[in-house]
Image (cartoon, rainbow, N blue to C red):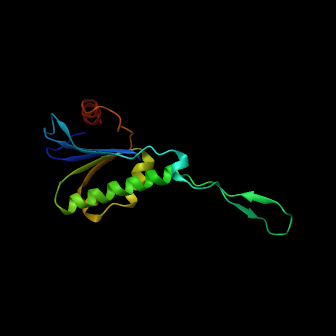
Amino acid sequence: MRISHDALILVADGRKSLFLRNEGDADYPNLVVEDQRAQAGLKDRDLKSDGPGQAMSQGGSGRHSTMEETDYHQQEEDRFAADMAALLAERAQANGFEQLIIVAPPRTLGELRQHYDKAVEARIVAEIDKDLVNHPVDKLEGVLKGL
């Protein structure tokens, strides 16, 4: 993949994000970290206040079924993705980038897509469904160049 000079690259998952800028050229990318954010690794007990609820069945048999427990960690990851999309929208409206490449695992990428602003959508040149957020920057350059 060729990454244009000054392109913005968002590498994210549901808990961590890196905003990188290509200060090199398309043939020799030089990715530089502009910003990085991480979500606090909250424990389950910090995210919820109580156990799953119960409901009485209709018909008077006296049986109850347990409701499915909410996945609070997934909710936090989805919220983090929405926050990243909002940050991209702010940057796009301030003309902070002309081209955008987004690298994220499929679930995070799907959540980001739900929150893209029109200005962000217009600047996306590639979406890559890979989890690369924990790769060192020099390895990211190689992986992206090889795509």
Q: Residue at x 18, y 47 (%)?
A: 7
- In front of the other: 129 or 95: 95
Q: Residue 64: x and y, percent?
A: 78, 60
Q: Residue at x 51, y 49 (%)?
A: 46
Q: How many marks?
A: 0
Q: Residue at x 78, y 65 (%)?
A: 57
Dividing the image into 4 quarters, which one contains the C terminus? top left
- Left or right: residue 107 versus residue 136 is right
Q: Residue 40: x and y, percent?
A: 41, 45
Q: Residue at x 51, y 52 (%)?
A: 47
Query: Which residue reaches farthest right?
Result: 61
- Left or right: residue 134 versus residue 51 is left
Q: Residue 120: x and y, percent?
A: 26, 59
- Left or right: residue 68 versus residue 33 is right
Q: Residue 28: x and y, percent?
A: 15, 33
Dividing the image into 4 quarters, which one contains the N terminus? top left
- Left or right: residue 70 versus residue 125 is right
| Relative to 138, residue 114 above or below | below
